[in-house]
Image (cartoon, rainbow, N blue to C red):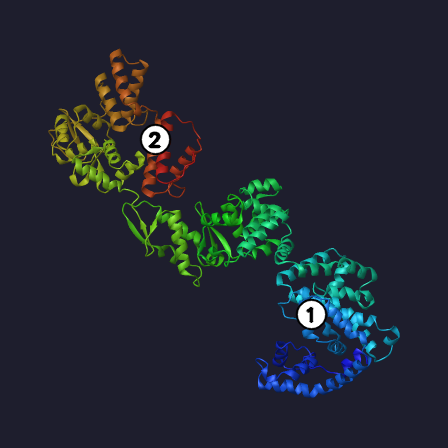
Amino acid sequence: MDTTKSSQKFIDPIKEGMLSVRALNCCKSIGVENLFQLLEYAKSNDLYHIRNCGPKTILELQDAINRYGSNVLVSLDSQDKTLLNHLPLSAEGIFDDCVLNCEEVVQDYFLNMFPNAKTLYTQCFLDYSSVFFALPNTVSIETVFDCWQLGYDILLKTLQVIPPQFISKADSFESKLSNCLSLVNEQFIVAKVEFILSRLSAQLIEVLSNEFERIKGQLSTRAQNVLEKEQVNAKTIIQFCNTLVDYRKIRYCGKQTASDIIIAYSSFYEFLIQLAYSSPKKCNEIIIRTKYQFLNDEETKEIIHFYEENGYLPFFKLVYLYFIKSNDRQDAIYNRANGITKSPQTLTDIANEFSLSRERIRQIVSHYSPSSELYAILTLLDSQFYSFLNKDFIDPTEVCPIISNSEFTHSNELSEDALVGILSLSKELKPLIFGEKILIINTTTFESFDFGASIKDMSNTLLSKTTEDVILPISIFINNYILNHSFDYQKIENIVAYIIRHMFEIDIDRNKNILLKRNAIDVEDEFCKILESFGTPLSFDELCSRLLDLHPAISYAPGTLRSFLFNSDRITAIGRTSTYTLKKWNINHLTIRGLIHQILEESDIPLSLDDIVDFLAIKGRNTNRNSVNSNILLDDKYHFVKFEGGLIGIESKKYAASFIQIDRSVVSRKSFDERFVDFLDYIDTNHHIPFASSDDVEASLNRWYNNVIKGVLDVTEEQKKRLEAELSKREEYVMTSSEFSFIEKCKDLKYFVSSEYELPTNKTDALLYNWFSKTRKKSFKFTPKKEKAYKDLIQFLSDYGFYMED
């Protein structure tokens, strides 16, 4: 009887999987793979002794023995008789010789399965696959294959001693042996492949699949299509190649295509065997070299050594080596922009190198997508091995030295820029840049909070000047910038606290309160204290000198300090003398002309120049007749009038008829000394020499000055020298009308900035804005005085926090 007929006659419920899962698991636990083995087990063991086998399962197994066992026993009995009648005398000798000539461990496992020749032939005739019996996973692949080979050798040697004429007899022992051996021989490699695949790790299976795909990629398109249509993979390719002998059964597969596939995968079985017999170290090397083909031998050894010491692959080292070896243009651009292997380059430099536009380079960097090879490396970034990934944020300055020391030979190989660029490849991480610092933060956190607006608010608040210690809750920089309420408040709070500490260098207490220390002085208050301590008005220079003595660290420009006095509610200037007093002292701060007008308002009669000088002295202004007279003559605001007898009044008051008013249009010629005094008083009062203007007095003094200089007037050499000496003392006031106008514009701009705390615009002050724009462009030539005034203006604006590009 041949094997095919036997398989139709004898039904094995265990081999066919006809029993319940629990019953099959119980059979597996006692090493039973077919009904015959179960019968043998039941002869010497009680089914109740099977572990985890309940009453229902025992009944199911017993029922299988009762229902199917009788047929097997009948067959076995007849088989036994056949073996007793026809088994060659040398068969048992061959069995014993083969078993004795193999290794002891192979003997033990084989005899445990086949105690004698009779058992071997009986089981093999029932099912040829009994030769490929299973062994525990602890048994090596080599031992398993030796056991299988032993069974095959016994069958083969037994067949070889049988005369050919006996093999042809139907249903004879010799015929059954020949058929069984033919099937074993046909399925031997297939069984080996299936067994090896069951033993390979997932990583080695991946290596096998990669090798399969590599070979497949070298085939023709027709051959690749055949493999895809037949759904052939790394696990089935060897068996498929065996079937290609009869290629006509496969659609769209011609003789040449079948030949190409067979030749291409001819060494695949040897590669599988190499994987199966490789040592763990060799397997690791194969896995790494297959997955990361850009590594050379030396680098592979370093990676394996790291893996053996630490139990995981060096993620950062692999990414670093990938970018060094990659020839892909997008990889090179991303590398240069982020400084992974070299110092980072600007987008302009990269654009010039690759002959692309700067915008195109920016798009490539911002939309960079890792290749499949790099993506496989990115999967190695695991918080199990890199604990810093579990933190609220990653500080490259702290992490970079740790990674450099653990994964790189040289500590300077991995820079902070490279670390940021590598971590930015992960979709779960994103860099946060503030000032010169960078933090790596989880992408989810970024989507939950507006860091940009929060940091801008911090800059405006924490960098402002404060004249006293201030405590601020950190929540003011968090609550207003929440984008998604399903966020981790504690994590955001820790990040914001870190930014405040490291970017702004400000302390935070345990209760998350910001301790903002005093970083400026109250200039107005300090000036008030200085005036209080001296008890008398002081000049601007004296006030500045005293302030710098008390606070040498401050760095205010004179224009800025003057603005504090100008805007003060407690300090006032006394006239135009740059002398300042406290308002509470009630010292009259009017100009000389204003005081003269006040004195005349309070008087019912006109006063002489001497009387006016005396009253001015009482009000704290020491002056003389000439100065008073000059101020009266130059006035166009208070409308002073002169009366006979040298008396002075004001136009708005009515005096007694006895006071006769003198017509102002009557001009009397003055001496040099009078003109000289008037000229100097004008300069001291107006801080510039008289110009040719529409004002009669100023124009008159300008003509007198020009006539003296040009020699038109008959003046002595001594008089000229007196004039030159006085002018040298007032050198800063000797200027042209253009210079004076420029200096006044500078003062106007300073006043505007000190009042509004911003530069003028077309909307706020168009004239001042246009003048300043032209001045910055150097639209006209600067004289030394204009240059000095302009530099002082720029310094003033810089002190106010405006960045002015010179």
Q: Is residue 165 visible?
A: yes
Amino acid carrying label 2: it is: Ile
At horizontal 62% and vertical 63% (from top left) the residue drawn is 202
Vertically, is 100 above or below 319? below
Q: Quick check: 691 above or below 294?
A: above
Task: Measuring from the top left, give residue 523's x and y in whole percent.
Answer: 26, 40
For residue 107, which numbered disc appears in the image? 1
Foreground: disc 2 or disc 1: 1
- Residue 212 seen: no
Q: Which mark is residue 743?
A: 2
Assess whether mark 1 and mark 2 are in contact (beta carbons under 8 angstroms). no
Q: Residue at x 53, y 42 (%)?
A: 343
Q: Please report whichever mark, 2 or 1, sits nearer to the chain's N-terminal start.
A: 1
Mark 2 → mark 1, Cα distance in angstroms: 113 Å
Query: Which quarter of the rendered picture does the C terminus lie within?
Result: top left
Q: In the shown orientation, is residue 670 left or right of residue 448?
A: left
For residue 151, which quarter of the picture? bottom right
Disc 1 element:
helix
Q: Position of residue 769 (x, y in %)?
A: 40, 38
Residue 293: horizontal and vertical position, in percent? 65, 52
In the rendered structure, which amino acid carries the disc numbered 1?
Gln
The residue closer to the viewer here, 276 or 801, is 276
Q: Indicate the position of residue 219 as horizontal and vertical percent values.
A: 75, 57
For mark 2, give the secondary structure: helix
Give left or right: position of 424 versus 543: right
Q: Which mark is residue 321?
A: none
| Residue at screen point 75% across, 62% down | 225
Q: Quadrant of residue 731?
A: top left
Q: Dividing the image into 4 quarters, which one contains the N terminus?
A: bottom right
Q: Nearer the viewer, residue 636 or 533?
A: 533
Above or below, 673 relative to 662: above
